[in-house]
Image (cartoon, rainbow, N blue to C red):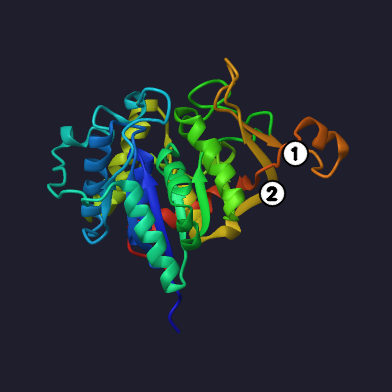
Amino acid sequence: MSVSRTPVVLDVDTGVDDACALLLAALHPAIDLRAVSCVDGNAALDDVVRNTLTVLDAAGRPDVPVARGADRPLLEPAAGARHVHGDDGLGDLGDLGWTPSDRSPDSRHGVELLRDTCLEAAGQGRPVALVPLAPLTNVALLLRTYPEAARGIAEIVFMGGAAATGSTTATGSTTATAEFNVVHDPEAAAIVLAAAQELEVPVTMYGLDVFYEPVVTRQEAAALVATGGRAAELGGRLLQFQCERFGRAAATIGDAGAVCAVIDRGALVTELLSVRVELAGARSRGRTIVDRREQDTDLARETHPETPTTVRVALGVDGPRYAALWQHTLLGKAR
């Protein structure tokens, strides 16, 4: 009996961990990767597009359309993360002789590609899981400019934010209080949460509370490189880059965990909570405010009289299970 594949659309700022997610989505047999839109974030947009095409080439998926989206946040100047992802945004693979893709992106703007893909999915009666792994600029523009596209979105699973549920859990990565994807374009994140609530699109937040849990060791990364398979080698080299750059014995698969959540939701512990994005604080701008109080109390209504955005927030994950899922997929052993 054949298993139905989940239609998925990614929005990326590729990035080392976005590349890990792209490999998983492109190769796992349970995923039908329909399209990829690119946005400025970890690297400049031209680099993001090139990196995305390079990763899909390595995965043997030149059939997946890739489009250039927004080249900056809605309000603020762009600010990359090359100190994390390398000068090329992809672990400096060029220094290892890795040849970038020579393909050109789709002629449509990234937001138009998202719109067309979602509307096509709606017409087929098979709405997509939209998985943003980047600043939410493209998705904000999509939902406000083409709200009808929501008919073709079954859910949004975004990597971003933090609930900071434990004493050792960081509330931020880029600042002391904010995670990169949200603080890079906080207005866009706030728009997406509000629009998803209005358009009745379910949202899952895969944030820093779980982001660092699925890890691959140096030895496991070396084993992937040694297989000789193009996709496995790329994934292994990206994780080796992380280990070397940060001096660690293991590297997180990062954004790939959000794709794992689409494939295997059972390994994720979530709770329905109200989430808001702080836009005004001088030191807390971009923080995701996750309200864990009883939402039907008078105090909650008095403190936040506006309609809350209810999000399924990831609070725990079986990290080894997701790491194994990712590795097995790159090795061609996923089922």
Q: Does residue 227 appear left or right of residue 210 in this picture?
A: left
* Outermost residue, top side: 282
**Could you say where residue 97 lies in the image, as x and y percent from the top left?**
13, 38
Which quadrant holds the N terminus? Answer: bottom left
**Could you say where residue 319 lies in the image, as x and y percent from the top left?**
54, 48
**Could you say where residue 227 lies in the image, as x and y percent from the top left?**
25, 54
Q: CA distance from mark 2 to mark 1?
A: 9 Å
Examine the rendered structure and indicate whether residue 93 appears above or below residue 330: above
The amino acid type of the residue labelled 2 equals Glu
Residue positioned 28% across, 38% down in the render: 48
Q: Which residue position holds label 1?
A: 292
Q: Does residue 93 appear left or right of residue 298 in this picture?
A: left
Examine the rendered structure and indicate whether residue 327 appears above or below residue 87: below
Task: For mark 1, give the secondary structure.
Answer: loop
**Could you say where residue 16 lies in the image, as x and y percent from the top left?**
34, 38
The amino acid type of the residue labelled 1 equals Arg
Contact flag, marks 2 and 1 (Cβ < 8 Å): yes
Q: Which residue position holds label 2?
A: 271
Q: Quadrant of residue 120?
A: bottom left
| Residue situated in front as seen by the camera: 221 or 110 | 110
